[in-house]
């Protein structure tokens, strides 16, 4: 197996992991043990597949290996405790799945809703789902929530125990359960997409496999709920944003900002589909945050050149969005839009207010935005300092390189 094949196998494992976890939880009803068994199966695959080749049905292979590992664990625990409960007898004798019963079903969407259980707080549900379905690390999730890693690790652990204790059935929610869980599921898919579109750490700016999986699941959700305006709005947002993916990086993976992208590389079919979805969602009357973000993305996408961007319309949309969202990133982008309409001083005032609130204290994006606006205002030395401060605070190598390049450009008089 060559390097490309190994890379493809690794990507396939990441995509299959939540599907396999869903199948194992559906059979064993134990979230924590199921997750451990799936991790063991993934490790086995990572060791065997490069040597022996990817099996004909990789999903069934992983389910069978994970099931056997969990069965062995249950048997071992039963022997150690010198007793056999009815559940252990059932699992020990009947749970190993036949390949033909595991080939066609994708439990990922059900797993999404199960993780967003009503027994969990919204923050805990979203964190658990990002871990189980999105495959994000605890560090990545902590960054998305702007909390310490240790705090997030405790939150995820407690969430697993809560789901286990609840005895929640593995199924899609009832009509009564649907609405409250749907909001959490949409937010999870939004965060998974964002991590794929701009990775929070590592050597690659983007993780396309995450973005594609988020889009796949959002499309499946939209098909289940075609009249939900926010489900349509989120899918539109993803399409309109992902349409720029190819133009966001250069030949060597370097970051290319929106203003300098070759817009002929943008996916016009994806933009057209996104605009059509957004138009349909807005026509239903209940405007939500994802529809507004999709509308902002559409304004950017429809500008033939960066200088043609309708910034007053974008600012108006951010003003509406800020009224219904407490996300500090919304406030940051609102400040940037204000600078593009009213001048750098207006944007810097918005950033100062955001910093005083403490919601983005020390975050690299706050320093990067301030550097950009200081540069627009002609304060080169302060812009250089903020570009460097932003570079010091990001764990993304492409972002760090871009920020240092901007600082060097200003230092050299560019």
Image (cartoon, grey):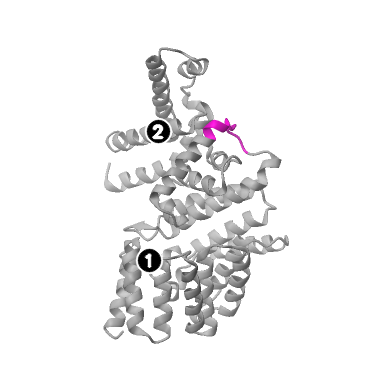
Please indicate whether residue 11 sits to the left or right of residue 280 in the image. Answer: left
Please indicate whether residue 278 sits to the left or right of residue 334 in the image. Answer: right
Residue drawn at x 36%, y 67% as measured from the top left:
255
- Point out residue 249 in the picture as x, y percentages from the top left corner: 37, 66
Give the mark, 1 or 2, whose residue is nearer the N terminus.
2
Crowd band around label 1 with a 10 angstrom C-alpha radius: few (<14), some (14–19), many (20+): some
Q: Which of marks 1 and 2 is in front?
A: 2
Q: Is mark 1 on a helix, strand or loop?
A: loop
Q: Check residue 63 for magenta coloring.
A: no
**Residue 346 vertical position relative to residue 118 in the rendered view, above or below:** below
Q: Which of 397 and 258 is in front in this view?
A: 397
Residue denoted by label 2: 36
Q: In which quarter of the image is residue 65?
A: top left
Q: Check residue 170 for magenta coloring.
A: yes
Residue drawn at x 47%, y 83% as measured from the top left:
344
Q: What element carries label 2?
A: helix
Would residue 125 be visible to someone looking at this image? yes
**Residue 18 vertical position relative to residue 333 in the rendered view, above or below:** above
The quadrant of the image that shows the C terminus is bottom left
Q: Main structural element of the magenta stretch: helix, strand or loop? A: loop
Residue denoted by label 1: 249
Q: Nearer the viewer, residue 121 or 114?
A: 121
Please indicate whether residue 58 sits to the left or right of residue 282 in the image. Answer: left
The quadrant of the image that shows the N terminus is top left
**Residue 48 vertical position relative to residue 319 in the rendered view, above or below:** above
- Point out residue 155 in the picture as x, y percentages from the top left corner: 47, 44
- Point out residue 186 in the picture as x, y percentages from the top left corner: 58, 52
- What range of the chain is rendered magenta? 163-172
Dots 1 and 2: beta carbons under 8 Å?
no
Q: Which of 273 and 89 is in front in this view?
A: 89
């Amino acid at each position: 197996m060559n390097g490309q094949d190994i890379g493809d196998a690794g990507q396939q494992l990441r995509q299959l992991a939540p599907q396999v976890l869903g199948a194992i939880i559906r059979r064993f009803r134990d979230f924590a043990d199921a997750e451990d068994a799936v991790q063991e199966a993934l490790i086995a695959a990572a060791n065997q597949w490069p040597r022996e080749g990817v099996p004909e049905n990789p999903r069934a292979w992983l389910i069978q290996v994970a099931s056997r590992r969990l069965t062995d664990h249950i048997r071992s625990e039963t022997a150690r405790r010198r007793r056999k409960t009815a559940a252990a007898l059932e699992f020990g004798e009947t749970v190993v799945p036949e390949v033909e019963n595991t080939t066609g079903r994708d439990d990922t969407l059900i797993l999404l809703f199960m993780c967003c259980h009503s027994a969990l707080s919204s923050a805990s549900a979203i964190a658990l789902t990002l871990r189980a379905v999105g495959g994000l690390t605890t560090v990545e999730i902590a960054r998305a929530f702007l909390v310490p890693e240790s705090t997030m690790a405790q939150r995820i652990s407690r969430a697993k125990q809560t789901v286990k204790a609840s005895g929640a059935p593995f199924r899609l929610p009832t009509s009564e359960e649907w609405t409250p869980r749907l909001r959490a599921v949409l937010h999870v898919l939004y965060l998974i997409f964002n991590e794929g579109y701009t990775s929070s750490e590592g050597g690659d700016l983007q993780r396309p496999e995450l973005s594609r999986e988020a889009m796949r699941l959002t499309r499946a959700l939209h098909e289940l709920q075609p009249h939900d305006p926010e489900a349509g709005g989120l899918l539109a947002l993803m399409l309109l944003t992902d349409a720029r993916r190819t133009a966001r990086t250069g030949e060597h993976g370097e970051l290319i900002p929106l203003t300098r992208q070759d817009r002929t590389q943008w996916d016009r079919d994806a933009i057209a589909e996104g605009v059509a979805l957004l138009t349909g969602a807005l026509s239903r009357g209940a405007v939500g945050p994802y529809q507004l973000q999709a509308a902002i993305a559409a304004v950017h996408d429809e500008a033939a050149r960066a200088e043609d961007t309708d910034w007053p319309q974008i600012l108006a949309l951010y003003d509406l969005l800020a009224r219904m969202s407490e996300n500090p990133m919304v406030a940051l982008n609102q400040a940037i839009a204000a600078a593009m309409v009213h001048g750098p001083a207006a944007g810097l005032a918005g950033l100062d207010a955001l910093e005083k609130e403490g919601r983005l204290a020390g975050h690299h994006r706050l320093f990067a935005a301030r550097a950009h606006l200081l540069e627009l205002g002609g304060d080169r030395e302060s812009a250089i300092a903020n570009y460097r401060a932003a570079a010091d605070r990001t764990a993304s190598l492409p972002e760090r390189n871009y920020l240092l390049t901007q600082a060097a450009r200003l230092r050299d008089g560019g």
